[in-house]
Every structure is written in C-alpha cells, then in structure tokens.
Amino acid sequence: MKRQRILIVGAEKGLGLGLTEAYLKKDWEVFATHLPDADVSSLLALERDYPDNLTTGEIDVTDASHIRPFIDSLGARAFDIIFMVAGIYGPLHQSVLQASDAEFQQIMMTNTFGPARLARHLLPFMKPASTLVFMSSHRGSIAGNTEPGIGLELYRASKVALNMLARCIYMDLKQGEHTVLSVHPGWAATAMGSLDGAVEAEIDVKTSVNGMVNVIELHRNDKKHLFLDYENNTWPW
C-alpha cells in the first residue's frame, strides 16, 4: 500500500518535531524542514530510525531566496497534507507602543507573510482533495479576545493576519476540492510555549500533537476552511 505523504515546515523542535514523529509512527512518508542554522540532532535521530520514511530539507520562510531551491528539492512529490508550523512568540513585551520596526517585521514575516507566501508556492504540490494546515492560535480569534489587560498585541496580530491569508488561499483554491485548517495547538510545553521555562504551559507536547493529528484526520475531507483547536473545538474568527 502506498504511504500517505506530509510536508511539515518548521520541524526541528517543539510541535513540528512532535508532529514529525507522530506521522512517522503512523507510517507516513514525511518531508520535514528546518532552519539552515538549526540544531537538527533530533531530526537526524528520527531519520536514522525511519530511513525509508523521513526526508529533511532546509528553508527559512522569511527569506525569499530560499524558496526556489526548496521547491526544486521537492522534485515530483505530491502531498496529502502540508502543515505550516513555523512561528515565533516575538518580543516579550508584546506591545505596539514598545515594538521597534524590526521586531514587528520579524514576527509578521515569520508568523504570517513567510508561511502564507511559501504555502502559495506549494499549492502545485498538493494532491487532489488534500489538506493545507496552518499553525494558528486561539489568540488569533478577534471575537475570542475578551481578556482585558493580557495584551499580546503583536502575537495576536500575526495570527489574525495568518488566518485571513489562509482564508484567501482557500478561496483561491478550486472550491469543493481542498481543505484548509487553521489549528490552535493548545498552550503546549515547548520552548516557545513556556518562554524558555519562564512560565508553565497547560499541556505537554504529546497531548497537543496527538490532538492535532486526530483533528486533522477528522476534518481533512471536509473541503472547508475551519478554525479548530487540538480538542476539536471550533473557534470564532
């Protein structure tokens, strides 16, 4: 039986690494990307354990010059799922008043423009009736922002914008054929989620990853654009 195939962009650590391992255990063929200067020891360990299932490649989604070499490295592959995981928390202050131009540019390039731009380049690599997934956040829900004083302005803005660009992609795809999912992974105990150990997250990586894998499987044939979390709750836009 031919293996199903997934592309995971941003897989060297955290949730991307966890998703890579989860799909390898399901006997999927995985193409996992990492930043050019990243520590890839964990990915290499998985590559040794799953030599026939895992391929790795490098790309920085914020650098346009990386796109063509990366696209060329995919060859004739076509994917059942493409999952755009890459993202950052941004500056700790998270304030529009305090943010420098460079800080705002970095979070929007990494969380929003970079993933959406690369996703558009990857559309020809989607199989018929395949699924495009974006790592969103419940913080990207405008209607769900009912927490005065929490702020998180920069992170929220980047995820709201990502949700909109995901919808634009869905509307430009052949209607009724592909599924686009914007998925909130929960507050997971990754380096980003815990701010490098400064705060305590709500769930572990395995809980988040297993939840997302299950939710994607439940909805990958819905042929809609949905905003869901790892527990299969629907979030308001």
Image: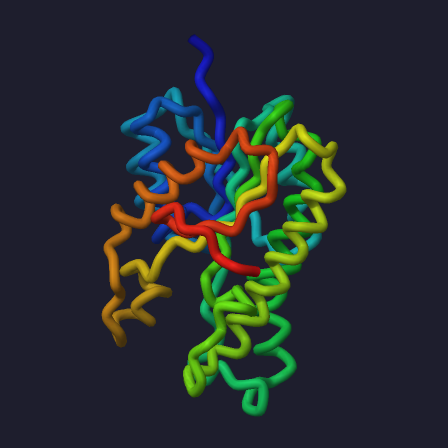
Residue that appears at 52% across and 65% down? 141
Q: Nearer the viewer, residue 185 or 17?
A: 185
Height in image: 158 above or below 14? below
Height in image: 206 above or below 148? above
Q: Residue furthest top?
A: 1
Left or right, residue 18 beside residue 35: left
Left or right, residue 48 beside residue 7: left
Quarter of the picture holding the N terminus: top left
Left or right, residue 147 beside residue 108: left
Q: In terms of image quadrants, where is residue 199?
A: bottom left
Whether residue 58 is visible to the viewer of this picture, yes or no, is no
Q: Nearer the viewer, residue 24 or 152?
A: 152
Q: Residue 80 at x, y = what percent? A: 54, 27
Whether residue 74 is visible to the viewer of this picture, yes or no, is yes
Height in image: 164 above or below 121? below
Residue that appears at 37% across and 41% down? 19
Residue that appears at 24% across and 54% down? 204
Left or right, residue 179 beside residue 190: right
